[in-house]
Image (tube, grey):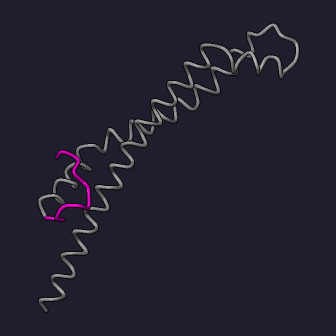
Amino acid sequence: MDDDFSIESDISERRANGATQWLFDNRNAIGKAKAERDKSEHMLRVTKNLIIAASELKTVSEREAEAYAHPKYQQAIDTLFAATAAHETLRATQTAATSLIDMWRSKNSALKAARI
């Protein structure tokens, strides 16, 4: 499926099936993206703490300032940003696919009720 989950075109059974297939095909990718995001959040804290522990500065605030400015911390932020973007993109597409399926169900239910 080409991820056409827009509501601008007709909500057909073919599109609803495509959305269902996308959800099935991407279930592992969504889980892995969430895991990568969680790992990146954890690694951001670990990186900060490792930099603080290695610092020779005296006060906690000086050590934290050094950690926040450190290239390794900046790299950890970039990794978290990429993981968050990937996860949120998959989640948004998942929501769109689920919404399309729900709209198709509602449309079919209304059509069946009109025939009775």
Where does residue 35 sit, x and y in percent of width and height? 45, 36
Q: Residue at x 73, y 10 (%)?
A: 54
Identify the magenta region: 1-12
> In the current view of this chain or complex, which residue is farthest to the right?
58
Q: Using the image, determine if residue 83 lies above or below residue 1.
A: above
In the picture, the quarter occupied by the C terminus is: bottom left
Q: Quadrant of residue 16?
A: bottom left
Q: Quadrant of residue 46 in the image?
A: top right
Question: What residue appears at the point 32 percent right and 40 percent down from the top-left corner?
Answer: 28
State the residue at coordinates (56%, 22%): 76
Closer to us: 91 or 28: 91
Looking at the image, residue 11 lies above or below residue 3: below
Residue sitting nearer the eye, 9 or 83: 9
Q: Tell whether position 95 is magenta.
A: no
Q: Position of residue 110 (x, y in %)?
A: 21, 82
User: Relative to 24, is 52 on the left or the right?
Assistant: right
Choose between 108 and 39: the one closer to the eye: 108
